[in-house]
Image: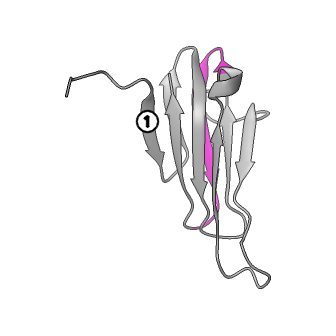
Amino acid sequence: MSNSIPKYNFTRVATSALLKTGAGRVMAVQLNGGSTAASLAIHNTVDGSGTAIYEIAAPFTDDDASAASTVFADLQSVEGVDLSAYIYAKLAGTGAVAYVWWT
């Protein structure tokens, strides 16, 4: 087995956070919903203000909204979501956790 450098950076997001200062790309996201309002928005700003560049939501999986789902988006086929200044992950929803792969 050879040692290698990971292809992308990987960050677990349990609360909104600035992931990168400078230009970058979001290559994949996973959102584990913890409530009906679980969502993740990717912003090109230092503080998550303004219009989101990319958004994903985790819908509930049953009729009575008692079980949150997991949503995964692989953005590699479109060469990722390009951000020119920052990568800010804005997380919403009680108990929500997101995973972001980025460069």
* Quarter of the rendering occupied by the N terminus: top left
Which residue is depicted at the point 55% across and 46% down? 16
Which residue is depicted at the point 31% across and 21% down? 5
Residue 11 shown left or right of residue 51 in the figure: left
Which residue is depicted at the point 65% across and 20% down? 79
Q: How many marks?
A: 1
Q: Can residue 59 be spotted in the picture? A: yes
In the image, residue 9 lies at what x, y percent?
43, 29
- Residue placed most toward the observer, 15 or 72: 72
Residue annotated with mark 1: 10
Q: Amino acid at mark 1?
A: Phe
The crowding category of the residue bearing disc 1, from other C-alpha atoms within 10 Å (few below 14, some 14 to 19, many at least 20), is some
Location of residue 11 by image quarter = top left
- Where does the magenta region start and end? 82-94
Check disc 1 and report its element: helix, strand or loop: strand
Q: Is residue 53 above or below residue 5?
A: below
Which residue is depicted at the point 71% across and 23% down? 78
